[in-house]
Image: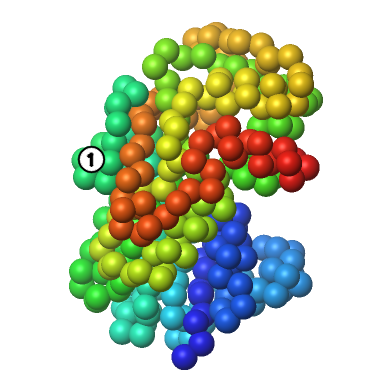
Amino acid sequence: MTNTLLSFGHGYTAAALARRLGAGWQVIGTTRRTEKAARLRAAGTEALIWPGEDIRPALDRATHVLMSIAPDEAGDPVLAAHAEDLARAAPHLKWLGYLSTTGVYGDHDGGWVDETTPLTPTTVRGRSRALAECQWQGLATETGLPLHIFRLAGIYGPGRGPFEKVRNGTARRIVKENQYFSRIHVDDIATVLQASIARPDPGAIYNVADDDPSPPEDVLAEAAQLLGLPLPPEVSFDEAEMTPLARSFYAESKRVRNERIKAELGVTLAYPDYHAGLKALMASGE
């Protein structure tokens, strides 16, 4: 049977996995937009408009499923529409991956969290993800879906680095005491997902983060140094002008442990910290 990945919400991270899987795989990606569907097809990915087109034939063909669509306050929209279809597909699926967020852990005042830490999300985004995780776990328990949950730290990579803001002078080093963020390069996410596909362990939960949780202002300072530009101005969090969404990211501070992806999946991160990641982006012409 040909390996076929059905990717719901085929975006930045899913595309990185598709590139990693390469020859020998068929990839079907869903998108909401007709223009993106055309781009996916031009790049060799079979594309479906969802919601809209019937995804059941693709689900019947799939051996692996990746879920990247963000939930809303009611939970996961794919489950709301296709729980019965997924239940029918469970016997022939080898792997199902759900991309969640480390935001489900909530605020730990800069302390460390791992996969056993209770979920205490404080933001709307975090609560929606925790609800969606619970919904997926419930369906997996009922049907035998081979569910794997990946709690992703802040994603960066080609096209999503800090360099543009530093170059154009809009970057600000917003400083808040004891503020830590964890990050992960998109290529390392793809490595983790591929390793899990090769070693399926239904029910497993993995934190996907690098080795070096750091204050956000340190990353901007490193970017400026690599560019040979002055440090972006420093602004205290209390005085910073920020959108409500941007400010919400500072509502939680934690450092995310990643030992499980190494011990259980044998993963070696290509970019174990932001120093390595930013240098690679610079070398690639970012």
The correct choice, above or below, for 239 with respect to 15 in the image is above
The correct choice, above or below, for 266 with respect to 157 in the image is below
Residues 6 and 56: in front is 6
Residue at the image position 51 percent from the left and 87 percent from the top: 2
x and y percentages locating residue 258 in the rendered image: 36, 44
Q: State which quadrant residue 36 falls in.
A: bottom right
Total count of labels: 1
The answer to whether any part of residue 130 appears in the image is no
The correct choice, above or below, for 261 with respect to 36 in the image is above
Residues 55 and 186: in front is 186
Q: Where does label 1 land, which residue?
A: 117
Q: In what quadrant of the picture does the C terminus appear?
A: top right
Q: Is 133 positioned to the left or the right of 55 in the image? A: left
x and y percentages locating residue 271 in the rendered image: 54, 43
Residue at the image position 51 percent from the left and 75 percent from the top: 5
Number of other residues with Cα within 10 Å of mark 1, as a class: few under 14, some 14 to 19, many 20 or more: few
x and y percentages locating residue 137 in the rendered image: 26, 62
Residue at the image position 65 percent from the left and 74 percent from the top: 45
x and y percentages locating residue 275 in the rendered image: 58, 32
The answer to whether any part of residue 259 appears in the image is yes
Residues 204 and 68: in front is 204
Residue at the image position 29 percent from the left and 67 percent from the top: 201
Q: State which quadrant residue 103 falls in.
A: top left
Q: Is 2 positioned to the left or the right of 38 in the image? A: left
Instruction: Identify the amino acid type marked 1.
Output: Thr
Residues 110 and 6: in front is 110
The correct choice, above or below, for 217 with respect to 66 in the image is above
The color scheme shown is rainbow
Q: Secondary structure at mark 1?
A: loop
Q: State which quadrant residue 135 falls in.
A: bottom left
